[in-house]
Image (tube, helix red, strand yellow):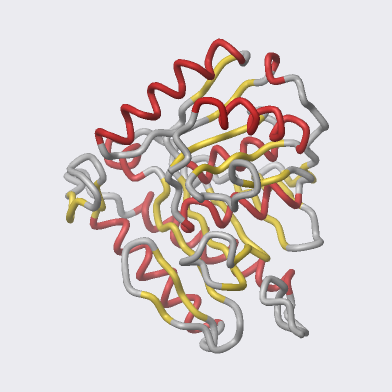
C-alpha cells in the first residue's frame, strides 16, 4: 500500500526545493519592489487586526501562476485564494506574506513561504511537507530544505548546512512564540505566557511563524511554540526544522497545529510539551 505521507515514486525532491526557492524569491522581490507608499488594506480575515493587503493577494497570484506553469498537475493551497486539487500527489502550500502586520507597518520581519506537501493540508496529521523555502525579502536570507536532503541557510555570502544541537534544559532556553488576532485567543495566550516565562531563559515574539521556525533551525532561538497556526504558516518552516534534525509536533501525541505547534530539538520539545500540557487549554 502506498504511504500517503510519502512523495509519489520518482518525485525529484531537489527540483521541488529549487522551484520553491525560485517562486519565494520572485514573490519576495514583488512585495519589496512594488510596495506602495500608501499600502492599502484589502480586507480583514478573522478580526479587524487580522488584515490582508493588496500585496498579499498579488504575491499569492504570482506564486500560483509560476507554480502552475512549472508543474500544472500539482495542487495549490494558498492563504488568500481558493484551492486547486492535486492530480500529481503534490500540493503547494503558500503564505504570500507571513507577517502581514509587520509588512503593513514597514517592519522588515516578514517572509514568503513556499512548500511542496503530500497528503491533505486541510487536516492536521494528514499531511507533511517534502520540500520548501522560506525567504526573508528584505535581507535576502533563504532557509531551504527537502526530505532527506538536510536544511540550509542561503545568503549573499554563501550557504551553510543547518544542524540543531541536542538540548533539553528548558530553563536555559530562549523561546519564540506568537499571538493570534482574536481578542479571546490573545487573552488565553497571555495567560500561558505568564506561566511559561518564569520557566525559561526568555521569550521572543517576532511576528512571523515561518521565520520563528527557521530561527529554531539556525540556532537564533532554541525552541518555538504557538497556538492556532494554519498550514500556510507552518509548511515551509516545518521541513526546514525537521531536516535540520529537530522535531515539529503538537502537544502529547497530537499533530502540529492541533491546536498547538512545538518545534525544537527532541529533548527540549519534550520538556516544553510537558510544561505546556500543564498550562494550555487543549480544547
Rendering quarter of residue 194 = top left
**Where is the C terminus found, in terms of image quarters?**
top left
In the visual, does 38 lie left or right of 131?
A: left
Report the number of discs: 0
**Where is the N terminus found, in terms of image quarters?**
bottom right
Residue sitting at x 57%, y 50%: 256
Q: In this view, does 165 lie above or below 174?
A: below
**Is residue 215 or residue 87 the one in the foreground?**
87
Give the residue furthest to the top.
Answer: 198
**Residue 230 in the image, given as x and y percentages of width and height:** 44, 53
In the visual, does 44 lie left or right of 80?
A: left
**Residue 242 in the image, given as x and y percentages of width and height:** 72, 50
**Residue 160 in the image, given as x and y percentages of width and height:** 78, 44
**Is residue 232 or residue 71 the one in the foreground?**
232
Q: Is residue 159 above or below residue 102?
A: below
**Is residue 117 or residue 57 the one in the foreground?**
117
Q: Is residue 243 above or below residue 18?
A: above
Residue sitting at x 74%, y 43%: 246
**Residue 35 in the image, given as x and y percentages of width and height:** 29, 50
Residue sitting at x 41%, y 58%: 96
**Is residue 75 or residue 103 the one in the foreground?**
75
Amino acid at each position: 500500500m502506498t504511504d500517503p505521507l510519502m512523495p509519489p515514486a520518482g518525485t525529484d525532491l531537489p527540483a521541488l526545493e529549487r522551484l520553491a526557492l525560485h517562486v519565494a524569491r520572485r514573490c519576495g522581490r514583488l512585495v519589496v519592489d512594488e510596495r506602495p507608499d500608501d499600502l492599502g488594506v484589502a480586507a480583514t480575515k478573522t478580526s479587524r487586526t487580522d488584515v490582508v493587503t493588496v500585496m498579499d493577494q498579488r504575491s499569492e497570484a504570482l506564486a500560483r501562476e509560476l507554480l502552475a506553469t512549472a508543474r500544472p498537475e500539482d495542487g495549490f493551497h494558498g492563504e488568500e485564494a481558493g484551492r486547486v486539487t492535486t492530480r500529481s500527489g503534490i500540493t503547494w502550500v503558500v503564505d504570500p506574506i507571513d507577517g502581514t502586520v509587520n509588512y503593513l507597518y514597514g517592519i522588515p520581519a516578514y517572509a514568503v513561504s513556499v512548500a511542496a506537501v503530500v497528503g491533505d493540508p486541510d487536516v492536521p496529521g494528514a499531511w507533511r511537507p517534502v520540500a520548501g523555502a522560506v525567504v526573508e525579502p528584505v535581507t535576502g536570507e533563504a532557509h531551504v530544505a527537502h526530505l532527506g536532503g538536510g536544511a540550509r541557510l542561503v545568503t549573499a555570502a554563501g550557504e551553510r548546512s543547518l544542524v540543531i544541537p541536542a538540548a533539553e534544559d528548558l530553563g536555559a532556553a530562549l523561546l519564540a512564540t506568537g499571538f493570534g488576532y482574536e481578542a479571546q485567543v490573545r487573552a488565553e495566550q497571555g495567560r500561558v505566557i505568564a506561566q511559561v516565562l518564569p520557566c525559561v531563559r526568555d521569550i521572543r515574539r517576532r511576528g512571523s511563524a515561518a521565520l520563528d521556525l527557521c530561527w529554531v533551525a539556525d540556532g537564533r532561538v532554541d525552541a518555538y511554540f504557538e497556538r492556532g497556526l494554519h498550514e500556510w504558516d507552518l509548511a515551509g518552516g516545518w521541513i526546514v526544522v525537521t531536516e535540520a534534525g529537530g522535531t515539529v509536533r503538537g502537544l502529547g501525541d497530537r499533530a502540529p497545529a492541533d491546536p498547538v505547534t512545538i518545534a525544537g530539538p527532541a529533548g527540549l520539545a519534550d520538556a516544553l510539551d510537558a510544561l505546556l500540557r500543564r498550562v494550555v487549554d487543549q480544547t
